[in-house]
Image (tube, rainbow, N blue to C red):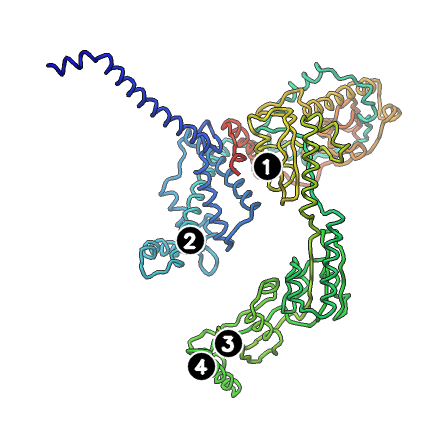
């Protein structure tokens, strides 16, 4: 009871303690939840139909496709540009698939497992022919696929199989799952398109009209008053005119992604004259060394040449173009350079040591001489050589040593331009100089002994033993530091965008203008500008802001950016600079057309129009309704003429037609029909196909409805 009374006496205190504990628990959960929400928000790479796309999920798709590219092309690494292209393809495919699946879900369209298996087993889908499971004719072989799938788990679980074999099986399996997934997605899209195509039909009347539109032709005498005959200064354009025109043409100003305008200064850092003079002096030293008989391999290596020295004679196609075009005019033992090649900004030395005639391709078969060590292998090789000299058949000897001795072609492209060790150099040089039918014993240091028989040679070409020293005329560290310091000083003295624009030219800098979207990979075509791109599209960046000074490119560019405009996704404003320029041009054209139509109103014939100031005349043949007439003397395609002439009769005179480049008058001189025969069935099919092509624009509408947001620039 005493204990209970103590609790009662301290009840308010205990309630407070419990309340604080409960608050701490709730606060902890809130902080944890908030932390998760912020982390998840930072992982959002985009949004489709309001659903967030997680960057990790997207990266998994990119990795999947990257592995496919490597597997199918035999690559181990990809360049940055290749990876950027892959990410673009994966994103576009992902968005398209999400859009199609969204529509198919509403319609109840699916691809069942049974359907997918039927497609695979029949083997008709073109994607199946891209798999390794093919017969000798190159067609998909379902049985090979089944055999592979049945073996896959056995191989992966086998303790006897090496890791390399298991890796190959897993690569093959992943590639197959990728193909299978894409066939399912492709089939679903085809079902949706088939449903749409079922809504498109033609009829005999439309078929007949389509045929006549192509085959009924007219010849006209034409007179035109081009819009260029009216001066822009004579036309007044007011904001009300622009707004009215904007409302008339509003749909063409709709954008599917945000774009931003910016001005920038890009400074490519180049070698100074002092840098060039220093490099020239260094190159003169290497030229003297080569002239005095220095080892070409050592000299080229010490000079850090972009073109390595080959101990084997090589064909000119392996060499840079500027070097290759010199060789035929050079005598053996002669030397050229140092000389500057402006195209690749290099300074060069070329010394032709020797020129020989060698085959581009050599066919060879070989036997590796067995033996427990090199001495034993050489004895076996000598025995084989003696047997061959005595007339024994090469194939029978190879069979004796359990070797296939198949014939293989060795082509110059396989080894030229590669770093070759002494054994490879010896092997290739021996075969290139050996006679067809000869047997050659080749001792490969530390690797064994090979008996190689040359069975054929083809395409004898000139090959060169040539030492090439090619060095880029790069800037020095001092030159880069000076460019950086000078630009930094300029920006410090001109912190605002308007100051930079006003004073750039005085300081020797050029301000340029660009508009771009966040889906582009570089700013102003300069490499390694990801941070600049992020700054441009950062929500915190405002119009008029000046970016930090970015060091970018291949460590050879200095870049600063000034944001000048933001165009959100959707309809661009009528008073946007680009829109306003376009609208002004269109309004001017409308007002010029009105003036010229009024001027042409009194004309009763082509001759009357031809007398007017600025008029041009021409005879135009083969005008039909199916294609736009091109008026060469005006320089425009004119749909209005195609439509009007096709409804006119021979002898008719019409005037005041407003076109794209002029106001027209014409008189129909003649009307003819081609010799084509009407085929109702064919015409109906063509009409339906044309309608389907027009309907294919449905993807744009679906894309707009999906409200796609692309934030990849934040991650790559």
Task: Locate the N terminus by quadrant.
Answer: top left
- Residue 301 at what x, y percent from top left? 64, 62
Report helix, strand or loop for mark 3.
Answer: strand
**Earlier along the polypeptide chain: callout 1 or callout 3?**
3
As drawn, the label of residue 33 is: none
Query: For the residue carrying disc 1, how many other residues have a C-alpha within 10 Å: few (<14), some (14-19), or many (20+)?
Result: some
- Residue 664 at what x, y percent from top left? 79, 26
Per the model, the C-alpha gap separating discs 2 and 3 is: 35 Å
Q: On the image, numbered disc 3 is attached to which residue?
A: 450
> Between residues 482 and 333, which one lies in front from this camera angle?
482
Q: On the image, numbered disc 2 is attached to which residue?
A: 172
Per the model, the C-alpha gap separating discs 1 and 2 is: 33 Å
Q: On the image, numbered disc 1 is attached to which residue?
A: 520
From the viewer's perspective, is 84 left or right of 310?
A: left
Q: On the image, numbered disc 4 is attached to which residue?
A: 376
From the viewer's perspective, is 593 left or right of 689?
A: right
């Amino acid at each position: 009871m005493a204990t209970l009374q103590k609790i009662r006496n301290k009840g308010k205190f205990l309630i407070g303690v419990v309340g604080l504990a409960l608050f701490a628990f709730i606060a902890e959960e809130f902080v944890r939840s908030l932390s998760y929400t912020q982390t998840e928000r930072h992982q959002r790479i985009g949004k489709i139909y309001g659903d967030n796309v997680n960057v990790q999920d997207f990266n998994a798709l990119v990795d999947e496709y990257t592995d496919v590219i490597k597997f199918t092309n035999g690559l181990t690494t990809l360049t940055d540009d290749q990876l950027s292209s892959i990410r673009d393809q994966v994103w576009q495919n992902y968005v398209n698939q999400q859009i199609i699946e969204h529509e198919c879900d509403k319609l109840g369209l699916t691809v069942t497992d049974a359907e997918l298996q039927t497609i695979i087993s029949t083997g008709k889908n073109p994607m199946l022919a891209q798999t390794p499971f093919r017969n000798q004719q190159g067609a998909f072989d379902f049985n090979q696929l089944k055999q592979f799938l049945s073996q896959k788990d056995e191989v992966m679980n086998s303790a006897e199989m090496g890791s390399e074999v298991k890796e190959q099986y897993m690569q093959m399996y992943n590639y197959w799952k990728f193909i299978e997934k894409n066939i399912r997605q492709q089939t679903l899209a085809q079902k949706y398109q088939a449903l749409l195509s079922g809504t498109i039909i033609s009829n005999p009347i439309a078929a007949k009209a389509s045929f006549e539109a192509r085959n009924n032709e007219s010849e006209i005498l034409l007179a035109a008053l081009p819009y260029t005959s009216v001066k822009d200064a004579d036309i007044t354009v007011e904001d009300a005119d622009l707004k009215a025109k904007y409302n008339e043409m509003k749909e063409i100003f709709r954008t599917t992604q945000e774009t931003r305008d910016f001005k920038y200064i890009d400074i490519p850092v180049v070698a100074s004259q002092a840098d060039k003079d220093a490099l020239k002096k260094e190159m003169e030293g290497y030229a003297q060394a080569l002239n005095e008989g220095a080892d070409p391999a050592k000299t080229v290596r010490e000079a850090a040449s972009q073109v390595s020295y080959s101990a084997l004679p090589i064909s000119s196609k392996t060499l840079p173009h500027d070097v290759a075009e010199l060789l035929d005019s050079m005598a053996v033992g002669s030397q050229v350079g140092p000389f500057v090649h402006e195209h690749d900004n290099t300074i060069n030395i070329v010394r032709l040591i020797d020129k020989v005639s060698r085959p581009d391709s050599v066919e060879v078969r070989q036997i590796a001489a067995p033996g427990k060590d090199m001495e034993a292998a050489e004895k076996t090789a000598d025995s084989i050589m003696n047997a061959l000299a005595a007339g024994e058949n090469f194939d029978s000897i190879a069979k004796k040593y359990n070797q296939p001795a198949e014939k293989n072609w060795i082509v110059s492209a396989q080894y030229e331009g590669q770093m070759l060790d002494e054994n490879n150099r010896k092997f290739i040089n021996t075969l290139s100089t050996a006679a067809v039918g000869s047997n050659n014993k080749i001792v490969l240091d530390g690797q064994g002994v090979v008996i190689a028989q040359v069975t054929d040679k083809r395409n004898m070409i000139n090959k060169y033993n040539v030492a090439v020293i090619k060095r880029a005329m790069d800037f020095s560290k001092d030159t880069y530091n000076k460019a950086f310091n000078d630009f930094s000083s300029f920006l410090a003295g001109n912190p605002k965008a308007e100051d930079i624009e006003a004073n750039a030219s005085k300081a020797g800098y050029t301000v340029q203008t660009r508009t771009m979207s966040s889906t582009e990979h570089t700013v102003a075509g300069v490499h390694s500008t990801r941070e600049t791109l992020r700054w441009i599209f950062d929500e915190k960046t405002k119009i008029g802001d000046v970016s930090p000074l970015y060091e970018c490119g291949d460590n050879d560019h200095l870049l600063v950016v000034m944001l000048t405009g933001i165009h959100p996704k959707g309809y661009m404003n009528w008073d946007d600079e680009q829109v306003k320029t376009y609208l002004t041009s269109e309004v001017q054209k409308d007002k010029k057309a009105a003036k010229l139509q009024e001027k042409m109103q009194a004309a009763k014939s082509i001759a009357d129009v031809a007398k007017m100031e600025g008029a041009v005349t021409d005879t135009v043949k083969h005008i039909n309704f199916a294609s736009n007439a091109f008026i060469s003397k005006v320089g425009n395609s004119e749909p209005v003429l195609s439509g009007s002439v096709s409804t006119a009769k021979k002898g008719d005179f019409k005037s005041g037609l407003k076109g794209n480049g002029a106001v027209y008058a014409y008189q129909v001189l003649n009307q003819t029909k081609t010799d084509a025969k009407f085929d109702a069935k064919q015409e109906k099919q063509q009409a339906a196909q044309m309608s389907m092509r027009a309907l294919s624009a449905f993807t744009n509408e679906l894309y707009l409805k999906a409200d796609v947001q692309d934030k990849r620039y934040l991650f790559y």
